[in-house]
Image (cartoon, helix red, strand yellow):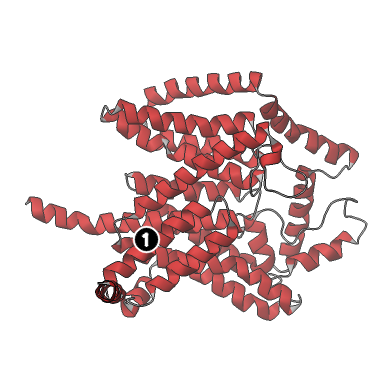
Amino acid sequence: MTALARETTGAMMLRRLRSPAAWAESVDLFAVLTAASLPWSTSLAAIFNALMLVCMVPFLDVRDFLQSLKRPICAAPIALFLLALVGTLWSDAAWGARLYAVNPTVKLLVLPVLLYHFERSSRGRWVFVAFLVSCALLSVMSWLVAFNPALSIKPGDVERGIFVKNYIDQSQEFTLCAVALAYPVVMLLREKRYALAAVLTALALSFFANMAFVIVSRTALVTVPIMLAVFALLHLRWRSILIISAGLLACALLAWQISPQLRKTTDTFSRDYRLYTQEKVPTSIGERLEYWQKSIQFFVQAPFVGHGTGSTKGLFDKVAKSAEWVQGVRVFPNPHNQTLNVAVQWGVIGIVVLYAIWLQHLLLFRGDGLANWVGLLVVVQNIFTSLFNSHLFDFHEGWMYVIGVGVAGGMVIRARQAEPKVGEAGS
């Protein structure tokens, strides 16, 4: 019996190894695990992503895949990677720094792969659900750490309410989940499915409550109103917009009154600006102003092709030794602005390619439906948060963009390809 069982198990394994459907399921599974692990671990997310790519190889239709790369939504991200690679040729930085600066653009090569796979897979929503559930669990841990900092696994000084990663990454996740839930809530209310709508509303409010009373990044404070405005303009009537806006304003005023953490975070805008401009004290806002001013000067020096890949750190190191640099301001390898980061390294050419990526992906999500809404929201969030950070190149936010646009984009293309078939069937 044991030998027979082994033979049967071996035969089943062999059949699965020869089955394209089984490999496609494995790709779906590892995509889900990548999304679920992203809020918690960079290492796990990288491992699951690598396994996902490996599982695509055995039955990949190479000709069809290469054909899909010609679409602008795929070609633009690839072009930015190639520009970073070619940009190493005219950079003055050490080769180690040049190759290290190419690394943030490598993740963009996964985006066309995800678009291609989820055009053919019906399990894209699994990825969204996995990310949402993972962020909900992280929110619970954030509350626990806020009350008991010893629970945090971060070494050294623990940021309030941070179990892993940092408050910027956590705020990005919670903001995306909270605003993304607005669409299914409205759809459920229109279908009179009040119980499930109430559950999702409570979940969205829990994310907002965490950001109001535990910790939130200033970038999130700026982008949340913009993302909510996008949703309102696209999916609500003017009467509903006015009623909901009044409710949100009332909630915001209430949160302001009862949340010292929210007031403290907001007050840092004016305080940091005043300390930097009047007293020359290094602050977060002051540092950004310093980076932006100097980056514009670097761009003017080489406006067309930039200074080359990996050149930013050396340029900042050099100017930091001059008298015009505000003493105490730290030297970072990027100017905390996505456009300026690209402009310094690759000039106008880089800016055109970067904006082409955002534009093509915005145009991809012009329709209605959950996938269109999630994809649009991911792109809008990345564009506006990239005013204050280089979020397309950062590991966490960059992967949020790649996974969000890749999965949602594949779902959108799949749905559009199915539309004529539905029409034919109806006729």
Residue assigned mark 1: 28
The answer to whether residue 112 is seen in the rendering is yes
Relative to residue 308, is residue 139 drawn left or right?
A: left
Q: Residue at x 49, y 61 (%)?
A: 356
Quarter residue 284 falls in? top right
Q: Residue at x 75, y 49 (%)?
A: 288
**Viewer-closest of 259 and 314:** 259
**Crowd rating for badge 1 (residues with CA inside 10 Å; few <14, some 14–19, many 20+):** many
What is the total number of numbered labels drawn onto the structure image? 1
Quadrant occupied by the N terminus? bottom left
Amino acid at circle 1: Asp
Quarter residue 390 falls in? bottom right
Which residue is at the far front?
Answer: 1
Q: Residue at x 40, y 33 (%)?
A: 200
Q: Position of residue 153 (x, y in %)?
A: 67, 48
Q: Position of residue 23 (x, y in %)?
A: 33, 69
Q: Position of residue 101 (x, y in %)?
A: 67, 69
The answer to whether residue 215 is seen in the rendering is no
Q: Residue at x 71, y 71 (%)?
A: 307
Instruction: Please tell me whether residue 36 is drawn above or below residue 237 in the rendered image.
Output: below
Q: Position of residue 255 (x, y in %)?
A: 60, 22
Relative to residue 179, is residue 23 drawn left or right?
A: left
Q: Secondary structure at mark 1?
A: helix
